Image (tube, grey):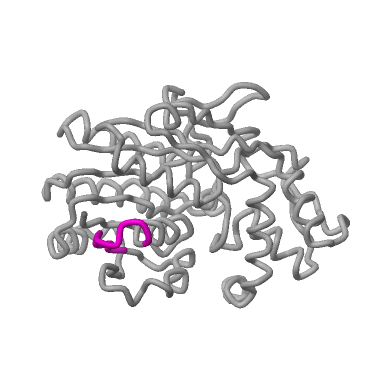
């Protein structure tokens, strides 16, 4: 398999590349990444020297570069992680999200169509479904109802991917995951932001009342799920990937404070984010039944391991926070 991973220098992408290299040493892995603030080649320094790994610096909206890469490396599978993904940034600059997440995906789809690739996997998010009440779960048939420019751009990309299946009979899959966490997560995101602020004895800003609920999925479990979808997912199928680990933001922040033995007075409530969805929760029954996937990590174990990783890798995140 000659696999093109877009956005592979980012958080989930670097974990997926390492997972695939370790499990399938005969696969060729090509990583194309624009290396924005969220892309970091240090994340892959341990595999950069391997003969089956190749890096291409570039933008997925660059049609000429994408076509050249797909043909030069004889790509037959594309897994699209590349995306602008920070909701706060999408509120400030929605045009960047539309360009990368929608136009970039369409550029990859056209290259795939022209090359006749075997499989295209779109890595999406549960945020495309909108917000849930206190009960219920997102399933694959839940109507798309995004509430932020970020989630709207991802929903638009999902629909574009689905259209290539319906129109051109392209073998595609869409995966929609709950909130990921784990090592190498950029410190602008909730869990690493709170960990690093606590370590620096800075105020830990919590939106609103802190009772917004998210379902949390360890990035390693997510990569195992994508691997199964890649090898076993039927054409056109959508798979929700969730950890059944619902927590309020405040519960998570308090857990971080407790593990680091920091004073709870560091927690600071700030004005709520615009369009802040109240609750997300995924029902992963389909991927469990169809592909045999189960999450391995409990949230308590995963969070403690993640906190310890940031404690042990301060050089990595301090450089990012300092710019």
Q: Residue at x 31, y 57 (%)?
A: 24
Residues 200 and 272: in front is 200
Q: Residue at x 43, y 61 (%)?
A: 14
Q: Is residue 77 left or right of residue 266?
A: left
Picture coordinates of residue 60, whole percent (x, y): 29, 58
Quadrant (top left/top right/bottom left/bottom right) for the N terminus: bottom left
Span of residues in magenta: 22-31
Compared to residue 141, the image places residue 189 above or below, namely below
Q: In this view, does 156 lie to the left or right of 258?
A: left
Q: Is residue 197 left or right of residue 153?
A: right
Picture coordinates of residue 44, whole percent (x, y): 42, 70
Residues 313 and 92: in front is 313
Q: Quadrant of residue 286?
A: top left
Q: In this view, does 87 lie to the left or right of 66?
A: right
Q: Residue at x 38, y 33 (%)?
A: 291
Picture coordinates of residue 120, whole percent (x, y): 26, 44
Compared to residue 96, the image places residue 214 above or below, namely above
Task: Residue 232: say if magenta.
Answer: no
Q: In which quarter of the image is residue 67?
A: bottom left
């Amino acid at each position: 398999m000659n696999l093109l991973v877009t956005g592979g220098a980012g958080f989930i992408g670097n974990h997926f590349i390492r997972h695939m290299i370790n499990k399938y040493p005969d696969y060729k892995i090509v990583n194309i990444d624009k290396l924005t603030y969220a892309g970091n080649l240090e994340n892959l320094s341990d595999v950069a020297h391997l003969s089956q790994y190749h890096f291409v610096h570039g933008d997925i909206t660059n049609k000429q570069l994408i076509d050249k890469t797909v043909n030069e490396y004889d790509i037959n599978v594309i897994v699209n992680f590349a995306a602008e993904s920070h909701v706060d940034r999408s509120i400030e600059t929605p045009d960047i999200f539309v360009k990368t997440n929608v136009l970039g995906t369409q550029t990859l789809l056209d290259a795939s169509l022209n090359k006749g690739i075997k499989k295209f996997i779109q890595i999406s998010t549960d945020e495309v479904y909108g917000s849930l009440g206190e009960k219920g779960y997102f399933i694959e048939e839940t109507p798309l109802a995004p509430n932020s420019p970020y989630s709207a751009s991802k929903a638009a990309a999902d629909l574009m991917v689905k259209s290539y299946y319906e129109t051109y009979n392209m073998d595609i899959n869409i995966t929609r995951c709950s909130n990921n966490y784990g090592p190498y997560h950029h410190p602008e995101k909730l869990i690493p932001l709170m960990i690093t602020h606590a370590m620096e004895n800075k105020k830990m800003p919590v939106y609103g009342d802190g009772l917004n609920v998210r379902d949390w999925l360890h990035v390693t479990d997510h990569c195992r799920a994508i691997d199964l979808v890649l090898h076993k997912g039927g054409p056109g199928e959508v798979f929700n990937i969730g950890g059944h680990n619902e927590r309020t933001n405040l519960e998570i922040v308090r857990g971080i404070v407790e593990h680091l033995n920091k004073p709870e007075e560091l927690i600071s409530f700030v004005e709520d984010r615009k369009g802040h969805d109240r609750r997300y929760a995924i029902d992963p029954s389909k991927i469990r039944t169809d592909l045999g996937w189960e999450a391995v990590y409990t949230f308590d174990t995963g969070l403690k391991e993640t906190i310890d990783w940031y404690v042990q890798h301060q050089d990595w995140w301090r450089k990012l926070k300092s710019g």
